[in-house]
Amino acid sequence: MDRRRAIEEAVHSAEMEGGVVCDEFRADMEAYIRGEITPEDMLRHADALYDHNRRGDRILPPA
């Protein structure tokens, strides 16, 4: 499976479960698809975007 399809399926699955993917993380996913960042980079950025100790509350202002 190519990167784009894997990402699209992951986003679709999250959305079907009621999840929301923010614009910042979508930008990271596009950078991953283009080969500019690694999956680990995406996870590090997600950790910076969200305070996982507070159940996913955003800690950065919306774009």
Image: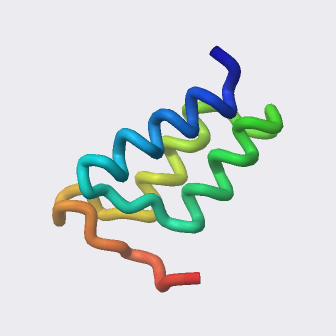
Is 57 situated left or right of 49 in this image? left
The percent coordinates of residue 10 (x first, y second) are 45, 36
On the rendered image, what quadrant is the C terminus found in?
Answer: bottom right
Seen in the image, is 60 located left or right of residue 37?
Answer: left
Q: Residue at x 53, y 53 (%)?
A: 45
Q: Which residue lies furthest to the top in this view?
A: 1
Give the image location of residue 41, x and y in percent: 60, 40
Q: Which of 56 and 5 is in front in this view?
A: 5
55 relative to 32 in the view: left or right: left
Q: In this view, does 48 lie above or below 9?
A: below
In the displayed structure image, the side of residue 50 where residue 63 appears, left or right: right
- Height in image: 61 above or below 13? below
Q: Residue furthest left?
A: 54
Question: Which residue corresponds to the image point at 50% horizontal and 83% vertical from the top-left?
Answer: 62
Q: Where is residue 53 in the image (x, y as percent from the top left)?
A: 18, 58
Residue at the location (38% across, 61% down)? 20
Marker count (numbered) = 0
Quarter occupied by residue 51? bottom left
Colour treatment of the image: rainbow
- The N terminus - image quarter: top right
* Residue at position x 65%, y 51% in the image: 28
Where residue 61 appears, as percent x and y from the top left, is 48, 85
Of 54 and 14, nearer the camera is 14
